[in-house]
Image: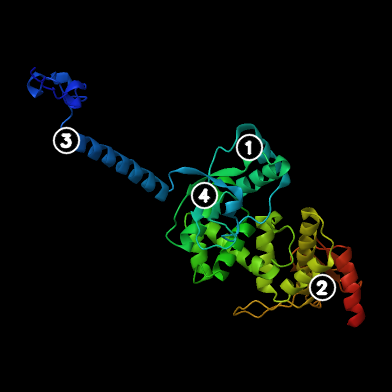
Amino acid sequence: MAKRKRLTPAQNSYLSGAPEGKSALGPALASPSAAAPAPIAQVASEAASQAALQELSDVLSNARAKGLMVEEIALEAIDETHLVRDRISQDEEEMAALMASLRARGQQTPIEVVPLSGRRDGKSWGLISGWRRLSALRRLYAENSEPEFSQIKALVIRPDSAEAAYVAMVEENEIRVNLSHYERARIAVRALKEGVFPTQKKALQGLFANAPRAKRSKIGSFVTLVEALDAVLYFPAAISEKLGLALVRQMGEDAEFAPRLKAALQLAARPTAVEELAVLTAALEDLQNEQALKARLEPQPPEESGAEIAPQIRQPAAETAPQERISSQIAAGLRLGFQPDARRIELSGAAVDAKLVEDLKVWLRQR
């Protein structure tokens, strides 16, 4: 009996389905729609995607470097003392209004910060401008710890120098909240002490380059006031331009005025700005009255002229009538009348007051 021949099974690959994207009948019969993409097309697509991502990254980096991107930064990461602040104090009514606005509408305007590095206290951002907004948000967060007030919107800027940083702070405050002349002068003095500017003149010119020359001159005058009284004043921002310039003028004319004024401030109780201004005004008026009295009592120097100077009070001539009255202006607001026969002297004018009478009594006793 003949042996049966054993058949070898077909290879498994022959019975399985054709690979995805390939026809089981061979490349010649494969469907065009099922063809795999060419390698060169896949490489080009990946390169285009990478280029687009790189371009987007460059745009974002450039915007951040130029301070055009608003970022959200945690409040505790900001050092508000990075620069010496130009604003001395904050009006509580204005702060309450700002907090109400932030609570109702959120933060509308970002602050400005610079990146810091190597700080042990964890502060990674230094405040340039926006101290009021930062303070208001910190107060709101301290009230109820609401997450929406835990961060602040900020523009990250990179000033070229410390001078540029101080200028940015001053200009932002000049636009948003008008500073007093004292506050402007104070930041110029502090910037000089910090070594930001080489001289006081350079500090004024650098910080207030856009201000008119007359305004910059007035700020420079207030520098004298800051240097003399900054350590003892409680409400310096309340000093008006007129009062401040008058105080500085008297300091220039009398070297003893600044120490006297400082002593008067230290002795006075000044719980409010009104009371402090009253002390400054009274000291100024006292000095002016002393100077006026001195000018009245001291003999006036004769005017230089080629002609002989006649005395202010003429002696009666032989033909003078017994009751003739001689009158002459001896000072501003003060006129002297003299009747020789009646042995009478009269003073008249706006400068005649009770204080003049008392001063004359003292002078006559010592005469």
* Label 1–label 4 contact, CB within 8 A: no
- Give me the C-alpha separation between circle 2 and circle 4: 84 Å
Q: Earlier in the sequence, mark 3 or mark 4?
A: 3
Q: Which residue is identified by label 4?
A: 112
Where disc 1 sits, the SS reads helix
Residue closest to the eye, 195 or 340: 195
Q: Is residue 3 left or right of residue 204?
A: left
Give residue 179's position: percent from left, percent from top.
61, 52
Circle 4 SS class: strand
Vertical relation: 223 (above or below) 72 = below
Report which residue position mark 2 lands on: 320
User: Mark 2 or mark 3, which has the lower sequence index?
Assistant: 3
Q: In terms of secondary structure, where does tag 2 sit?
A: loop
Residue positioned 67% across, 43% down in the render: 141
Residues 52 and 6: in front is: 6
- Can you give x and y, in whole percent of width and height, for residue 139 in the image? 69, 45
In the rendered view, does 71 fall on the left or right side of 131?
left
Quarter-of-image position of residue 234: bottom right
Query: Which of the two labelled residues, at mark 1 and mark 2, occupies the earlier sequence position?
Result: 1
Q: Indicate the position of residue 48 as horizontal and vertical percent values.
A: 24, 37
Q: Name the residue under label 1.
A: 102
The residue indicated by pointer 3 is 39
- Tell me the element at label 3: helix
Identified by mark 3, the residue type is Pro
What's the CA distance linking mark 1 and mark 2?
A: 86 Å
Marks 3/1: CA distance? Answer: 57 Å
Pointer 1: residues within 10 angstroms few (<14), some, or many (20+)?
A: some
